[in-house]
Amino acid sequence: MKNLDKVKQEQEKFRQKLAETVKEGDEEAVAQAFGEFAQGVQESILAEAQEMMQCTDTTVLASRGVRQLTGEETKYYQKAIEAMRSSNPKQALTDMDVVMPKTVIDAVFDDLTDKHPLLDAIGFQNTSGMIEMLVNTGTKQLATWSPLTAEIVKELTGGFKKVNMGLNKLSAFIPVAKAMLDLGPAWLDRYVRTILQEALYLGLEEAIVNGTGKDQPIGMNRQVGDGVTVTGGVYPEKATVPLNSLDPVTYGTLLSGMTITPNGHYRTVESVVMIVNPNDYLTKIMPATTVRTADGTYTRDVFPFPTTVIQSVQVPENRAIIGLADRYFMGVGTGKSGKIEYSDEYHFLEDERVYLVKLYGHGEPLDNNAFVYADISGLKPVVQEVVVNEVKGTVKTKEQA
């Protein structure tokens, strides 16, 4: 378990350092931080592999994060190891007659959604090899009892749109030490998945929340739909809506706008997500949604409407994104070639080679009413008023927002 703990510590250090370098906009610093993370993961996996080398129990290996590979995955990694060991890896990888199996990316996605609730909540899909994807922009389409006319056909087809999966590219560098190649396909798979998971997490959550739409997905805090003015590929931010109380009337009024579809019809809203900065959660949302029960204990995240709170460092302070998670579409996958490429652009460590995985995809809110960008700077905490019933001698509490 020591090595697993070390991996987690390295990942956390990586996230903190990488977040700082990303804010500074220094690409070289980002690359260096990523290289340091990769080195830490390599050392942990190598040490763990040496301890487990004699173990053939798949259950024990699985508990350490080592998957039992499919035949297609084993063949792919064996071919990749041979190419990476060659004297001319660039040519060898180009000549590879196998591509990264979709199941590898699926495994990465499973790990991501397990650990990052925002990615688990949205419409997150593996679109490997797809150029375009047809998505429903109106939640549901109704059959109509009337003569078949062009207007009906136009209305039905208007509820769908094509999303170009090749619009944006997310590149992940994978520095592979030669010692990693000696461990075999299963351990190389674990290493590749760990690196891809962190690279995807870094790129995805920021884009899902704040993406401008220019060479990246469109964020939840952006305006979309007909009539939106896009300047230089950048979609404008939504205007913030003040949210100073979470009482039923105020909160219900805020959410009511989500019941209108882009074509003007009504839809049922059964639950929403609220995405906030961790600091704002503790200083604003938690005080506003925590009540004391009759037995003296506290219950938190009490909303007048079903709401799942998700903490994300990508959300600016004093802001919250509230909306319909399934109305955000995010598709990511490898390109049609599905190949790892050799790159000599970065050299982080001695005695290793650097490879590049290109992932293509796009994400955007499916309609402009699906998300609200709220200003929670004035959000008031719950105040419980104690009322003494002199007739019965009982004490009651009344919540006030």
Image: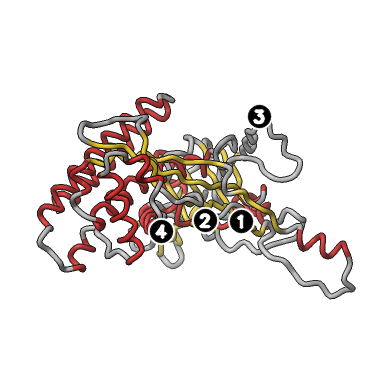
Foreground disc of the pair 3, 1 = 1
Q: Secondary structure at mark 3?
A: loop
Query: Which kind of residue does numbered mark 4 sit on?
Result: Pro
Q: CA distance from mark 4 to mark 1?
A: 20 Å
- Residue bearing mark 2: 127
Q: Could you tell me if residue 282 is visible in this image?
A: no
If you read the primary sequence from the N terminus, does the residue marked by circle 4 or circle 1 appear first? Answer: 4
Which corner quadrant holds the N terminus?
bottom left
Asked whether the residues under the numbered discs 2 and 1 touch, taking CB atoms below 8 Å apart as contact, a structural biologist would say yes
Numbered circle sitting on residue 133: 1
* Residues packed near mark 3 inside 10 Å, few (<14), some (14 to 19) or many (20 plus): few
Given the current orientation, which residue lies at the most extreme bottom position? 145
Numbered circle sitting on residue 307: none
* Residues packed near mark 1 inside 10 Å, few (<14), some (14 to 19) or many (20 plus): few
**Residue 328 position within the rendered picture, expressed as x and y whole percent measured from the top left:** 57, 52
- Residue bearing mark 4: 101
